[in-house]
C-alpha cells in the first residue's frame, strides 16, 4: 500500500486510495484500524460471527470489485502468468501485457460481441 501512486488531473499523485475493497478474509480489527488511521474507507463485508459496525456496508462499491476478480481469473488461464514462470520483472510484465492483448483480441473478435 505504501508504493501506490494514483494519478490526478492536477498536482502530484495520491499515495492512498479513497476506498479499499476486500472479501471477508480481510475483515479483521487491525486492518479496519489501519484503514481508518489512513483515512481510507473499507468496503469489506463483516463475518457472520462479528458485531455490526457503525458504518453501513456499501454493496454497490463491493459489486464493482468483481471486475478485478474476473480479470485475475482470466490471467490465471494463462499458465505462464499464474505460476510465474518468468522470474525477472521485465519478462513477467511483458508476458502480462501479452496476456492482456490476447484477452482483448479474444473479446474484440468474438461472435458474442
Image: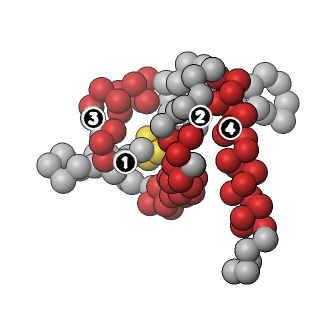
Q: Secondary structure at mark 1?
A: loop
Give the foreground label among 1 and 4: 4
Q: Which mark is residue 95?
A: 4
Secondary structure under badge 2? Answer: loop
Residue 23's disc number: 1
Which residue corresponds to mark 2? 17
Q: Are marks 4 and 3 in contact (CB under 8 Å)?
A: no
- The quadrant in which residue 96 appears is top right
Point out the tag, 4 or 2, that comes first from the N-terminus: 2
Pointer 4 or 3: first along the chain: 3
- Badge 3: residue crowd in 10 Å (few <14, some 14–19, many ≥20): few
Mark 2: few, some, or many residues within 10 Å (few <14, many ≥20)? Answer: some
For marks 1 and 3, the one nearer the N-term is: 1
In this view of the protein, which residue sits in the foreground, 70 or 44? 70
Position in image of residue 46 (x %, y %): 28, 49
Mark whose residue sits in front, 4 or 2: 4
Please, which colouring scheme is shown?
secondary structure
Give the residue pinned by disc 3: 28
68 in relation to 30, above or below:
below
Q: Is 102 or 27 nearer to us in this picture?
A: 102
Counting residues from the N terminus, which is met first, the one under dot 1 or under dot 2?
A: 2
Q: Quadrant of the C terminus?
A: bottom right
How far is disc 4 from disc 2 in space, using C-alphas?
27 Å
* Alpha-carbon span between mark 2 and mark 3: 19 Å
Q: In the rendered image, is residue 53 in sight?
A: yes
Q: Earlier in the sequence, mark 2 or mark 3?
A: 2
Determine which of the numbered discs, if any, sits on residue 48 in the image.
none
Distance Cα–Cα, label 1 vs label 3: 11 Å
Amino acid at each position: 500500500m505504501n508504493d501506490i501512486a494514483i494519478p490526478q488531473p492536477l498536482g502530484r499523485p495520491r499515495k492512498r486510495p479513497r476506498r479499499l475493497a476486500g472479501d471477508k478474509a480481510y475483515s479483521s480489527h487491525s486492518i479496519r484500524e489501519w484503514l481508518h488511521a489512513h483515512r481510507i474507507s473499507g468496503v469489506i463485508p463483516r463475518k457472520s460471527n462479528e458485531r455490526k459496525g457503525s458504518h453501513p456496508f456499501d454493496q454497490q462499491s463491493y459489486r464493482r470489485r468483481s471486475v478485478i476478480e474476473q480479470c485475475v481469473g482470466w490471467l490465471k488461464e494463462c499458465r505462464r502468468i499464474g505460476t510465474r514462470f518468468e522470474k525477472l520483472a521485465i519478462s513477467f510484465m511483458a508476458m502480462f501485457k501479452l496476456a492482456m492483448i490476447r484477452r482483448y483480441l479474444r473479446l474484440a473478435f468474438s461472435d458474442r460481441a
